[in-house]
Image (cartoon, rainbow, N blue to C red):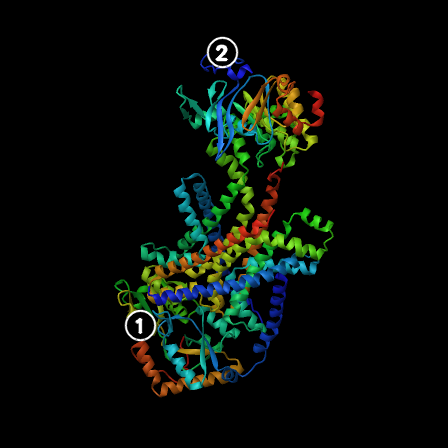
Amino acid sequence: MSDVSTAPTPAAQATPQTATPAVLVKGVTKRFGETEVLQGIDLAVPAGATTCLIGPSGSGKSTLLRCIAFLEEATTGTIAIHGDPLGFAEAPNGQRTRLSPQNIREVRSRIGMVFQQFNLWPHMTALGNVCEALVTVRRMKRSDAEARGMAQLRRVGLENRAKHYPSELSGGQQQRVAIARALALDPEILLFDEPTASLDPELTGEVLNVMRDLAASGMTLLVVTHEIGFAASVGQRIAFLDHGRLLLNGSPREVFGEPRHPRLAQFLETYLDRGAAALL
Amino acid sequence: MTLDFALMADKMPEILSGLWVTIWTWLVATILGAGLGFLVASARRYGPAPLDWLLKLYVEVLRGTPFLVQLFLLYFGGPFVGLRLEPIPAGLIGLTIYASAYFSEIFRAGFEAVPKGHVEAAQCVGLSRGQILRRILLPEMTMLVLPQCVNMAIILIKETAILSIITVPEMTGVISAIGSQQYAFVEAMFLLAIFYWVLVETCGYLGRLAEARLSKFRFAVP
Amino acid sequence: MNKRFLMKAMLSLALALPLAAPVAAQAEDALARVKAAGAMKVGTETAFAPFDFIDEAGAHAGLNVDLFTEIGKEMGVEIDWVTLPWDGVLPGLEAGQFDMVAGPATITKARVERYRFLSPIAEATVALLKQAGDDSIQKPEDIAGKLVGAGKATAQLAQAQAYGETLPGGIETREYVGFNEAYADLAAGRIVAVANSLPNIAYVAQTQPDVFAVVKPAFGQPSYFGYIGTKKPEDQSLLDAVDAAIIKIKEDGRMTKLQEKWFGTTFETPNEVPEPKV
Amino acid sequence: MSWRLFELMLWAAGYTVLLSGISIVIGLGLGLLVCAAKLSPNKALSLPATLFISFFRGVPLLVQLLLIYNLLPAVGIMVPSVVAAVVGLSLCTAAYQAENLRGGFNSVPRGLIEAAEMVGLSPFQQLRRIRAPIALRLTLPALVNEAILILKASSLISIVGVIELTRMAQNLAASTYKPLLFYSVAGGLYLVICWTVAGGGSILERMTKAGRT
């Protein structure tokens, strides 16, 4: 768990990427009215590895992911992407200042996000979804964007569905298009928010396979998931959240191995899918 | 009783000109009303809170009073505050403002109906606010609200009949005047009923056609 | 609960239809029917001062109200007023919605062919009303090429249009649901004149001398105002009775008093309906 | 404006509310019938219902009213002004309410009906105990909306000789030469009426929602 204590390295210093965490979460709390969903999270997500965020429903893991993507604003604390602050900059005296929308968009464009509900835009084809940001944000020529989009669709095995609208695709296919959409912008980090939770069991496999390939290719992935089997086999780091606190953070062996933290044991009992037990 | 439509046949040029006035005033008011309604809905969504309250009052007042009264106020009350409009501009402005209130509510619901996740997905790939409005919200909303918009357009076809009361020479005014001249009152009403019925059903048919064409864009429910 | 209500609604509809039907179905003598009911239904519009209008207290007033009160006394019946826009009055009469029409209506050739007129009650010769102080209109011909308003489906409108055709450049006309709207538009300056019968515009100009003025002389053919009934055989007995009452009122001087009250002047009207010139 | 004239306006507003109210209630009953006919598998019932809905939604109320007032007597049905107004408003709103109700019936979840079937409710019992109550509750917002639309549409019934709020304002505007004042007052009274109905509607909705799962 040494990563957690690693001091943030200023981005200006040309340290090797592996030394600077891909995502650094510092003292993040999140309050919705009276309820404190996140109660001071410190987490470093290493670059080039897959980190899985697990925990019971309501533990705050999705909120944490959304704070990292700056879809939610943390009540206190800061987020840095490869050392660059996202949303708020912190002065040495702890004072937070809001960064410009321009800056937020810039830093955020280095993150890709895959949602539980896919969130494909229904009025655009699969290819249209993938190319949208390339054309409107990156100002690429449409033909170049489409070539790149097709490549991404090929990567998720859907080049023959490019002209289909989301309503004409299965859930698994939609989620793979959503992954291609995120990949098209060449993100440094890919965030997954329970990517298979809305899928029928027979469709989760195709999505998990794509994610496995991505993990194997050395991308930085941060995955919120209920698929403990996937987390245990693909995740290189496991972070366990409970009641808004980060209880455990380490390699699968450290986290799942004996002796287990009592809260984790309880969680696994409730949530563990039977097949995964063998993997641990 | 017998109906004699031959009396009406002689007046075809006048009747057609009335029909034309009905159609173009309707089209202009519908398009301008939808545009203004969209502006109102956008301002209420993105503008400051006081503007939202003000526009809410605008919408509720227009939706809570009959079009006829609004038109009377504009046309007959207007000159008392220095606003002297000719019948056709008054009719167009009145109908546009009236329509904008209803359209703004349709669009407001449309904004709400676009899943938040679709906007978040756009934020995540770096689209700006304007781009999100233009590229994501507007097109998605259009297909969500199309049926209600067609409905409103149909209501507006019928509301144009009221413009005859401020002497706009549209179909109701022209045909009922001819009916009075020729003492063919019932024939005139029949003719009007048929004309409006055909207009409304045509509009409804075109709307359904458009909906069918857009249906493949409908939401894929995960 | 809904079902019970539905049953009631259906039952009452089912009952109402056959009950309503015979009223018009049998051609009952109109006078007998009115006497039996003790009331005569008279259709009119309330935007035709000084014959029919809503006074400043919100009550239906005018020469018609007074005159029909007298007629009612003569006949021993009450008067039930049905008021609607003028372009709905004649259709209503033809549909049998009322026993006769007050109005009054200008006696014209076309109307005489279709309706029965009763003894004339006033002059109806058409003249122009202009904005007070509008120097551009000194005589009727000055409306050439200009926009003139009148009530929809009125004889005054027809006469204005016919007169316009005799002027160089013609005139434009605008048709209003009622003369009140035309007066309002004249005051607002959207039109330059309103064509209406002399008694009407004289009254309007007299009540609002700051706003309106009458253009003299009258441009229209001399014509008269009369009340209207249908030519249906079953209606004639009633119309005869009303006609007799009107003539009696004229002869015993009550009419002169009413004219004095509402027009500020009196005019001779023939007892018989004269041959219309328009 | 004197108190006497304001009283007249209030009286006319009351008349507007009365006639609209009666029309809404009759229209709801008639709408239920038309809706039932439209949903019937029997073409002899559903086709006339479709035509009814299409006609009364496709023709301006102004024209409908004049047809009723001037045409029905010609075929031997006497309709006094008030009756013509109420019949016109009722038929018009019945067409709209039938469509609203149809929407309500169609959005009763299939599963609820299947569940009723499984516990042995007869088709009529299903209608009475399950489908109708749920459909009516689903239709309530549309019904409130429709009530407001009819209140406003009633501004047209003066065309058949009924003096309601708008006509009263028109009369008084002409006799006092103060159109701005009287049309504003009429508008204000319509607002009070419509907002009251809308407020009452949302209270009613909240009350019925409490019984919802």
Q: Residue at x 70, y 20 (%)?
A: A279
Q: Residue at x 25, y 63 (%)?
A: C133
Q: Is residue B119 above or below residue C26?
A: above
Please state which amino acid type lies under the numbered disc 2.
Thr
Residue B123 position in % (x across, y down) = 51, 30
State the mark number for residue A15. Answer: 2
Residue D5 or residue C83, whichever sits in front? D5
Contact between labelled residues 1 and 2, with CB atoms less than 8 Å apart: no
Q: What amino acid is found at the position of numbered circle 1 in the picture?
A: Ala
Q: Secondary structure at mark 2?
A: loop
Q: Residues within 10 Å of mark 1 (few under 14, many from 20)?
A: many
Which of A254 and A185 lies nearest the eye of the viewer? A254
Tell me if residue C163 comes above or below residue B141 in the rendering: below
Q: Given the image, what chain letter belongs to the residue carrying mark 2?
A: A
**Residue, disc 1:** C202
Closer to us: A41 or B86: A41
Q: Residue at x 33, y 62 (%)?
A: D178
**Percent from the top left, x then y, of residue C48?**
38, 71
Residue D9 in sight here: yes
From the image, which quarter does the N terminus of chain A lie in? top right
Task: Kindly identify which chain the residue marked by label 1 belongs to.
Answer: C
Q: Residues within 10 Å of mark 2 (few under 14, many from 20)?
A: few
Q: Position of residue D33 (x, y in %)?
A: 63, 61
| Rendered position, C41 above or below C11 | below
Relative to A87, A112 lies left or right: right
